[in-house]
Amino acid sequence: MKKATVFVIVLLMMGSVIALGCIGGSGTSSSSSSTSPTSASSSATPATKTTATSSTTTTATTTTTAEHTQTERAYYPITIKDFANRTVTIEKEPRRVVTIAPSLTEDLYYLGLFGRVVGVTQFDDFPPGVANVTRIGGYGKYANLELIANLSPDLIIADSYSLSILDQLEKIAPVVIVDPHSINDIPKALDLLGRIFNVEDKAKEVSSQFEAQLEELSSAVSGFEKVKVFYIVWGDPLTTAGGDTFISDIIALAGGINIFNDTSGWPAVSMEQVIARDPDVIILTPHCGMKLDDAYQKFAAASAAKSGRIYMVENENDLIHPSPRVVRGLEILAKLLHPEAFRKKYPMTITDFMNRTVTIPKEPQRIVSLAPSITETLFYIGAGDKLVGVTKWADWPPAVENISKIGGYGKYANLELIANLSPDLIIADSYSLSILDQLEKIAPVVIVDPKDINGIYRQIDLLGKVTNREEQAKLVIGEMKGEIAYIESKVRDLPRPKVFFILSYCQGYWTAGRGTFMDSVITLAGGRNIFNDTKGWVKVSDEQIIVRDPDVIVVLPTAGVNATELCNGPLSVTTAVKEGRVYTATDSNVYQRPSPRIVVAIEEMAEFLHPEAFGVSFNSTACAVSTS
């Protein structure tokens, strides 16, 4: 997904502060040598925290107001020591709070105090209600002081990344620095906030629940061998998380070993170093500047790529924000690293795309795939290491070169070769239905047969379920939807050009009609398929194409006709050819196979149709025909 590089830079800075906990500067009062918040001192004794209700008969409103006023006067003012060893006095109960780090907003949410938050950074994304809260600019020192002042807060909560603007913040309202830089500091942060807001019991409850969840997840994976993990922070230069980072702590709790645990901070590393340390799992994030398709090519020599264990997490903030939210990220990571620890119950009965009821007696360990799109999907969801047989047409990812070939696609597969592999599951599409009876004599057979984007989602979900890779499947679907939503947002308000797609040429042009995933690709990319009024894959004539006069023609490299040849044929009179808008796709397979890689086709198609929206251009050849 294309995101601004500056966002990643800020994200890295946020992570470095979280991970390293670099705290400097002096407090507003005297400071001690301790680096953790100490117990709060208060002008009121504990016995004065609650007051007796007057025996005088009053209205309910008056009684409630009186009790609240007496309680506030009894509890406040309080003096606390924050994470920067600053002594801060809070004169009254905070009712209007500005947070200058997303994790602090999250802390207040878990403590039931989100309703008091009146200002957050532009990077806050949790809880969902945060979308309605006023933004005060960037994170930490990049916050807008004027916007903060306009909100008239009675308390500002920040982490150490705001220390350089601390003096200016203190002119607006009291400032408390809360800066957890390890898992163990999160309960300390909750405890401090609990005392500040007079919700200590709630803070203890949230901390206890948080620690119990950590224990439950770490215990679930504790009996398994730790896997080597490479976490990609940024793709160019290749940047990862060192051993003293919050990310490294999460990897360890999830049952993994950070392969760069011997480094500090956020080091740039070489491809050679990564391959030498040979990670079992590679983790990407949506903002790292690298896609799954790219990663499988770049890290083809690593065990992670060979076994299909390269994952794109849906939201890195679940992993890097030091708040109770991190449990969400830890659970995801634990399931990615050790799916065996969260195994679903078998035997499992599912309904496949042909409405067949199939019972799978145990988690499949030896799978034969009868379609390249199925092979690709299994690698995407982290089940590539279960494949023992694929068709001769399977060519992605590179690791398939080392998997036994079972002949042709679908009904052209060699049954004897399949049987010799002793599979415990066979996965095929509708092109294998004519040999279904024979396949079922070898092993259980699941049929998947997506016809559009939603069908591809359903395929991913179903294969995730039968292979015990549900968490991974959910992430793949989430990433696909995110990529497609981004593309749609870029083309939504642009004119939709008429598109003719050439699958192949043989005494006529074969193209996509309604009900095909290619029709979905054209629509999602911001175009109009000129043969949308037909159904399925259809053969059309020169005359039909000329009458419909496409604005853009997209040709597959394997179509049997090239873009330049159209200049000298009947289609030279179409608007597409005359205006030089005939494009040759980069890879036929991403257009033809209903797998997660279809997103690559959608993106390229969108660039063909709306190059100005994506800042791309294409080279022209003879008669103004273009190739990518």
Image (tube, rainbow, N blue to C red):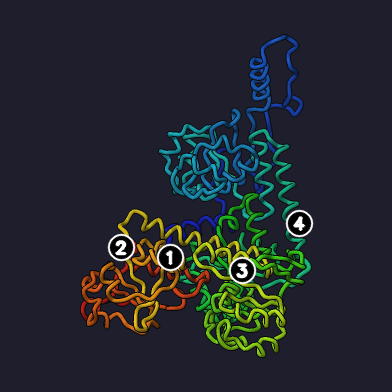
From the image, state whether disc 4 or disc 3 is nearer to you.
Answer: 3
Q: Amino acid at mark 2?
A: Pro
Lower sequence index among marks 4 and 3: 4
Residue at mark 2 to residue at mark 3: CA–CA distance: 36 Å
Residue at mark 2 to residue at mark 4: CA–CA distance: 54 Å
Q: Are marks 1 and 4 in contact (CB under 8 Å)?
A: no
Instruction: Residue under label 3, please give it.
Output: 354
From the image, state whether disc 1 or disc 4 is nearer to you.
Answer: 1
Where in the figure is residue 46, as x and y percent of width and height? 75, 29
**What's the residue at 41%, 71% (across, down)?**
512
Lower sequence index among marks 1 and 2: 2
Left or right: 486 with respect to 350? left
Q: Amino acid at mark 3?
A: Met
Toward the top, the furthest residue is 56
Lower sequence index among marks 2 and 4: 4
**Local SS, label 4:** helix
Residue at mark 4 to residue at mark 3: CA–CA distance: 39 Å
Residue at mark 1 to residue at mark 2: CA–CA distance: 17 Å
Instruction: Residue under label 2, please give it.
Output: 497
Instruction: Residue under label 4, please give it.
Output: 216
Q: Amino acid at mark 1?
A: Arg
**What's the residue at 66%, 47% (across, down)?**
36
